Image (cartoon, helix red, strand yellow):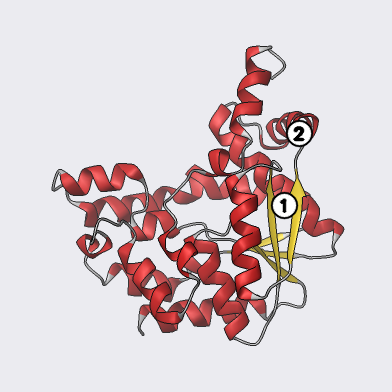
Amino acid sequence: MSLASALASAVSRAVSAESAAILFSGGLDSAVLAFLAKKSGANPLLITAGTEDSEDVAFARKIAAGLGMELEERVLSPSEIHDLYLRTAKLTGETSFMKIELGLLLLSCCELAEKRGIHLLISGTGAEELFLGYKMHSERHSAKENLEELRRKELAALHEKDLRRSETIAKACGVKLALPYLDEAVVEAALSIPAKENFSNGENKAVLRNLAREMGVPEPACSRPKRAMQYGSGIHQPLLRLRKRKLI
């Protein structure tokens, strides 16, 4: 099965749930999921979270409008960010500042989904590992390291690194997560494509970017550079200020 067919099938199965929404930043990974969901005949709600002036909220608005899909936003104030950080740390037992940052954003979206009566959130988790989207991947590609082995190791470690925390947060809100990029057929199809093909014309994740363009995903999403969630959402600086004041 081709990557395009495998991904379309995985998304179609996910959005067949009676109450599903997509975690949406307006970036490549989530825009592909939203595009395929709409193409399948579904029209799930898109959910985003971040500060009012954040890049993610601005991009989410722009790409959702381009797709003609409804976007629900949770715009976070400094006091909400503080509260969410403390509750995320308590809920997950995490002590890593970065992991709590990432969990905070998921918790904010899961709570919004719960409020809207949505019980399944579709996430782009796994795309960075599968299509080698981190800056470190580009650096290792330039150093001619073995990226085939690296991405398999990263995929194998993903549950312990991220998924366990995410599942704990979602479960606490009565929400389940669907992960189309980690669907068995999608992983198999992606891994059958040489890792080096993810780097071309000065872009990373070129396999997914080119597929998105062929499908007709809005170009701003296809070409948007990777930006870590804590930065794109605008929560990182408020959290640094809280940490400086020893409030977290």
Residue 42 shows in this picture: yes
Mark 2 or mark 1, which is nearer to you? 1
Quarter of the image that includes the N terminus: bottom left
Identified by mark 2, the residue type is Arg
Please say if 233 is above or below 201.
above
- Give the label on residue 192, or none: none
Of residue 103 and residue 176, the one placed in the foreground of this image is: 103
Please say if 3 is above or below 166.
below
Of residue 178 and residue 133, the one placed in the foreground of this image is: 133
Q: At x 79% / y 65%, what residue is drawn?
A: 118
Q: Residues within 10 Å of mark 2 (few under 14, many from 20)?
A: some
**Residue 129 x/y as whole percent:** 38, 54
**Residue 71 x/y as whole percent:** 72, 64
| Residue for badge 1 | 109
Give yes or no for contact between labels 2 and 1 (Cβ–Cβ under 8 Å): no
**Residue 209 x/y as whole percent:** 38, 67
- Give the label on residue 87, or none: 2
SS state under label 2: helix
Q: At x 77% / y 35%, what residue is drawn?
A: 77
Q: At x 75% / y 28%, what residue is drawn?
A: 82
Of residue 135 and residue 154, the one placed in the foreground of this image is: 135
Q: At x 59% / y 71%, what residue is drawn?
A: 34
Residue placed furthest toward the top: 245
Q: Residues within 10 Å of mark 1 (few under 14, many from 20)?
A: many
Sooner in the amino-acid sequence: mark 2 or mark 1 = 2
Residue placed furthest toward the left: 144
Q: Is residue 106 left or right of residue 206?
A: right
